Amino acid sequence: MSEELLAGSTSESADNEKATYATAGVSIEAGDEAVQRILPWARRATRPEVLGSLGGFAGLFQLKLDRWEEPVLASATDGVGTKLAVAQAMEQHDTVGIDLVAMVVDDLVVCGAEPLFLQDYVAAGKVDPELVGELVKGVSEGCVQAGCALLGGETAEHPGLMAPGEYDISATGVGVVEAGAMLGPDKVRAGDVVIGLGSSGLHSNGYSLARHVLLDIARMPLDGHVEEFGRTLGAELLEPTRIYAKDCLALAAEAEVRTFAHVTGGGLAANLERVIPEGLTAVLDRGSWTPEPVFGLIAQRGRVDADEMERTFNMGIGMVAVVTAEDVDRALAVLTARHIPAFVLGEVAKQPTVDGAEDGRRVLLHGNHLRF
């Protein structure tokens, strides 16, 4: 091998070329423009406790301790997953930000926490200021729906790791709950009633399977009209996740709620199981609600087993509230007034026994598999 190659010299033109951040694939100017496009949306999603202006190294939020006797901070981090592939294929980026907020704040509210603020992170192969602006527009709308502030975030350009047009988004949210008002499994008792809050569709889970079935197996075009949906497949798949945070807080203020369960990856049974304590079982009736048509289409076109559907998707229930039996009617009235579909799914009972021993399952789904 020649000394020239060992030294890394390739040509006279390469020797004379000046390397810059731009030639490496990162545009500082595009990043600055993206920030300017973000500012109006970030300013829209605010709260009185936010201090200072946007653009600092850290977001400032003044926690007014006189509101709580013993405040407990709650935090959650999440992303949107492969639903982003649909948004990128459709070149529609203004709804997945809503999904992002929903995935974070509805985890916070499970313990009764009021979402205070959220910070987002956008990583892109190439920063497109207009695209980033659309993403943050959705995040801002989600924060407004949740009642929290968009306190800041980060936009990163990753040339060589992601292709132009590709991006990923995530966020961390912080909420607060009074220590004595925290919800959770320790509050749940036998005789409590399980209420399901209807979903707006797939929400943000199961998209790897949904895309495999509908796009790869069934070869359905995203811009094709689907009679069952009354709109295109792409529009159905990009339907934003319903944000329940304000509805759950309103419900907890009006009725005796023991706990909530956010139905995300793993489905209804697995997520409800997380808030049912040892020795108790939630006994649910599959006939108490009907999933949206998109679930039936996936099951049919992919010949997906019913058990696999229930493990992967929310199947029409995006949030669960466990309430006292005395407050069921009040809870349903609150949710109806807030235009949230609600269904009595079943009740909490002592764990059944098998051959003298506890069954061990904390969620039992009775009845035939869901009908679409």
Image (spheres, rainbow, N blue to C red):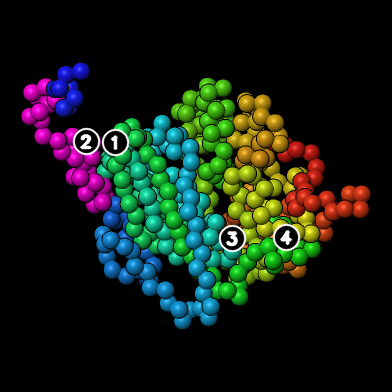
Q: Are marks 2 and 1 in contact (CB under 8 Å)?
A: yes
Query: Marks 4 and 3, how far apart in space?
Result: 15 Å
Three-letter residue code for mark 4: Pro
Three-letter residue code for mark 1: Pro
Query: Marks 4 and 2, how far apart in space?
Result: 54 Å
| Residue pointed to by mark 4 | 277
**Kind of element beneath mark 4:** loop
Residue occupying image coordinates x 47% and y 28% = 222
Q: Please tell me whether mark 4 or mark 2 is closer to you in this view.
A: 2
Mark 1 Cα-neighbour bin, 10 Å: few <14, some 14–19, many ≥20: some
Q: Which mark is residue 62?
A: none
| Residue pointed to by mark 1 | 159
Q: Earlier in the sequence, mark 3 or mark 1?
A: 3
Query: Marks 4 and 1, how far apart in space?
Result: 47 Å
x, y percentage for residue 219? 52, 21
Left or right: where 336 falls relative to 73:
right
Query: Marks 2 and 1, how far apart in space?
Result: 8 Å
| Residue pointed to by mark 2 | 24
Q: Are marks 3 and 1 in contact (CB under 8 Å)?
A: no
Mark 3 Cα-neighbour bin, 10 Å: few <14, some 14–19, many ≥20: many
Three-letter residue code for mark 2: Ala
